[in-house]
């Protein structure tokens, strides 16, 4: 029934060429359209196989023919030169990297800022150099008329409009005291699990380090006035339990806070009560790990490619400049 | 603490990461800094810090020292401060601070390790070293 209209068309009208083509295409067998190719061993070769090269021919295959040997005469020497140049560059780079690792240079951006902020200081230094040069010239020419000592300006420390000036009071470390550092970890009462981890880890460092770790804690902040007394009392009791077990909690006289003066209370307490026990004071938070040994002597030199070696040469002394540092 | 010990007899010691490179305006301040006991004694007795205690405290310590005029021995060593090597495992709000550089053997302070596993990983690395 499906082919009935087609047969009617073929009977009463001339079929178009496209109908004929599609009819031929779809009705013919795929075997006829794409006949299978003969297998490789039955197919005649398209290109005649060359004879295999003889050993002498193989030896000469990479080198030019005899009459063109001048074209590649200096290739070996040139290759040697290029290789030696690359090796030289690599060696120089290696030496520079090693020197940079052993003697790393400090970052001079802050110093550049200070010089930029204080043009008077740099001008004074230039005038100072000028004065020295002219004085030397006068001394060389034995000019007695101009032999007066030129007032040489002392090199001034970098000052700016923000700088306060000289210290109001000179205070010094006592060099006779033995080095001992107090590490104060700001830890609220609720971070007991973190304190447990920190005690467990820090106690495994060598015992002879001149380092003491204290947890600085204030009172909890009772946000609900209904149970404020109960919360405060119970937290104090639990804090005393913890301190009686571990003896490493320092109480400061304030409520727990982030930016309301806990650091000041801590430093005030340390300065008034612990000043004869320690020579240095550190302040950290409980989300920081402090490398208590802080040893760098051997491994810093060994790994030359590392950038972040915290040795003495990568650090620099800076005067705090408001606007750049603060 | 061998790095700090080399500055044992120096007055007015402030040792920390004070440099502001634009990406970390004030976050690196809280990770840790060392003060000489002379400065701490001065802070505990002076009137300058009392009027300036509310705010970003770690910045304010530096401000006190500048106001007192004791900023002549401020030592900046940003390379001693590092972060967790896989910051994407932690909180996204502290990811940028941890991306500053991964901790190394000579890193002094690793910060901020908000999650417990981050702190334990870091401590485990340093405890496995031969000191």
Image: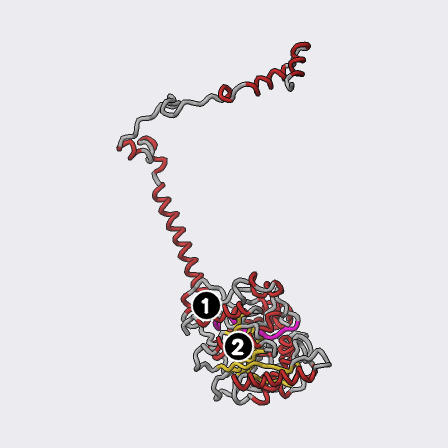
Q: Is residue B39 above or below residue B90?
A: below
Magenta stretch, main secondary structure class: loop
- A90 versus A244 height, above or below: above
Q: Secondary structure at mark 1?
A: loop
Name the side, left or right, on which A26 lies relative to A55.
right
Residue position marked by numbered label 2 in the rendering: A196
User: Quadrant of the image for the C terminus of chain A?
Assistant: bottom right
Image position, residue A130 (x, y; %): 58, 71
Q: Is residue A26 left or right of residue A309?
A: right
Tally the numbered discs.
Answer: 2
From this viewpoint, is residue A286 visible?
Answer: yes
Q: Check the residue under mark 1 and report the chain it is in.
A: A
Q: Nearer the viewer, residue A120 or A74?
A: A74
Disc 2 to disc 1, C-alpha distance: 40 Å
Residue in the picture at 45% in, 77% down: A205
Residue A314 counted in the magenta span: yes
**Position in image of residue A71 (x %, y %):** 36, 35
Chain identity of mark 2: A
Name the one closer to the observer, B10 or A209. A209
Closer to us: mark 2 or mark 1?
Answer: 2
In the rendered image, the vertical position of residue A28 relative to residue A213, given as above or below: above
Residue, disc 1: A103
Q: Quadrant of residue A73?
A: top left
- Other-residue count near label 1 (Cα within 10 Å), few / some / many at <14 / 14–19 / ≥20: some
Q: Position of residue A261 (x, y in %)?
A: 66, 80
Which stretch is magenta?
A311-322
Residue A322 screen position, x and y as percent: 65, 73
């Amino acid at each position: 029934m499906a082919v009935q209209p087609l047969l009617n068309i073929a009977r009463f009208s001339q079929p178009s060429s496209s109908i004929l083509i599609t009819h031929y295409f779809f009705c013919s067998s795929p075997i006829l359209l794409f006949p299978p190719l003969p297998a490789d061993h039955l197919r005649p070769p398209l290109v005649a196989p060359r004879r295999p090269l003889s050993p002498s021919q193989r030896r000469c295959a990479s080198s030019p023919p005899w009459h063109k040997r001048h074209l590649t005469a200096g290739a070996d020497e040139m290759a040697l030169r290029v290789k030696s140049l690359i090796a030289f560059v690599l060696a120089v780079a290696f030496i520079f990297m090693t020197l940079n690792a052993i003697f790393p240079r400090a970052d001079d951006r802050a110093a550049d800022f200070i010089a930029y902020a204080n043009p008077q200081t740099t001008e004074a230094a230039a005038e100072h150099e000028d004065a020295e040069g002219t004085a030397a010239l006068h001394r060389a020419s034995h000019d007695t008329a101009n032999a007066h000592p030129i007032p040489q300006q002392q090199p001034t420390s970098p000052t700016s409009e923000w700088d306060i000036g000289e210290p109001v009071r000179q205070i010094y470390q006592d060099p006779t005291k033995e080095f001992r550092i107090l590490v104060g970890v700001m830890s609220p009462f609720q971070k007991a699990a973190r304190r447990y981890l920190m005690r467990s880890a820090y106690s495994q460092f060598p015992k002879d380090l001149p380092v003491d770790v204290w947890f600085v804690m204030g009172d909890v902040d009772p946000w609900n006035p209904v149970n404020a007394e109960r919360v405060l009392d119970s937290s104090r009791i639990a804090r005393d339990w913890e301190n009686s077990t571990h003896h490493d909690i320092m109480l400061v006289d304030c409520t727990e806070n982030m930016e309301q003066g806990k650091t000041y209370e801590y430093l005030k307490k340390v300065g008034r009560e612990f000043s004869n026990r320690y020579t240095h004071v550190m302040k950290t938070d409980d989300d920081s790990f402090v490398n208590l040994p802080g040893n760098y002597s051997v491994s810093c030199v060994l790994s030359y490619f590392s950038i972040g070696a915290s040795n003495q040469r990568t650090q620099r002394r800076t005067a705090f400049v408001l606007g750049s540092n603060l | 603490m061998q790095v700090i010990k080399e500055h044992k007899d120096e007055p007015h010691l402030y040792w920390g990461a004070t440099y502001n490179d634009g990406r970390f305006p004030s976050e690196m301040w809280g990770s840790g800094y060392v003060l000489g006991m002379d400065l701490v004694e001065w802070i505990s007795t002076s009137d300058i810090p009392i009027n300036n205690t509310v705010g970003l405290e770690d910045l304010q310590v530096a401000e006190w020292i500048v106001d007192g005029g004791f900023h002549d021995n401020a030592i900046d060593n940003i390379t001693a401060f590092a972060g967790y090597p896989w910051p994407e495992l932690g909180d996204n709000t502290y990811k940028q601070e941890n991306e500053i550089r991964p901790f190394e053997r000579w890193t002094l302070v690793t910060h901020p390790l908000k999650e417990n596993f981050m702190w334990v990983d870091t401590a485990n690395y340093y405890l496995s070293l031969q000191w």
